[in-house]
Image (cartoon, rainbow, N blue to C red):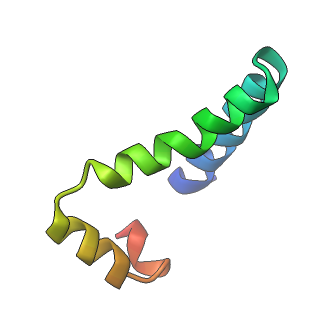
Amino acid sequence: MSKNAKIAAGGVAVGLILLIWLPWWAALLIILGVPAAAYLALDPSQRRRLRRATRKELGR
């Protein structure tokens, strides 16, 4: 299993645990809020570079 697949599987597992443990709206806020906060933490130049990159280039 590749590194990205392991990360994706872990994310799915954490999401399912959150849905069981927390109310659905709180789990949804966490699942959507973490990637949004990570994106907003980037510098403007890093955001431009990320938007320019295709999905295949993100793993490099």
* Camera-nearest residue between 23 and 42: 23
Instruction: Check the image and report above or below for 23 versus 57.
Output: above
View extreme (top): residue = 21
Residue occupying the point 62% across, 40% down: 31
User: Who is closer to the viewer here, 14 or 26?
Assistant: 26
Front in this rendered view, residue 2 or 17: 17
Q: Is residue 42 left or right of residue 30?
A: left
Specify the quadrant of the image occupied by residue 27: top right
- Please give the count of numbered marks on the rendered protein: 0
Answer with left or right where residue 21 lies relative to residue 37.
right
Using residue 28 as the reference point, say whether residue 59 is left or right of it: left
Q: Position of residue 29 (x, y in %)?
A: 62, 36
Residue 10 appearing in the image: no
Name the residue located 59 percent from the left edge and 45 percent from the top edge.
Answer: 32
Q: Position of residue 3 (x, y in %)?
A: 51, 51
For the view shown, which residue lies furthest in the right direction? Answer: 20
Query: If the image is split into quadrants, where does the C terminus sit?
Result: bottom left
Specify whether residue 49 is in view: yes
- Residue at image position (27%, 68%) is 47
At a point 39% along the width and 78% down the height, the residue shown is: 57
In x, y percent, where is residue 26?
A: 68, 27
Rendered view: 56 above or below 45: below
Give coordinates of residue 49: x percent, y percent: 25, 76
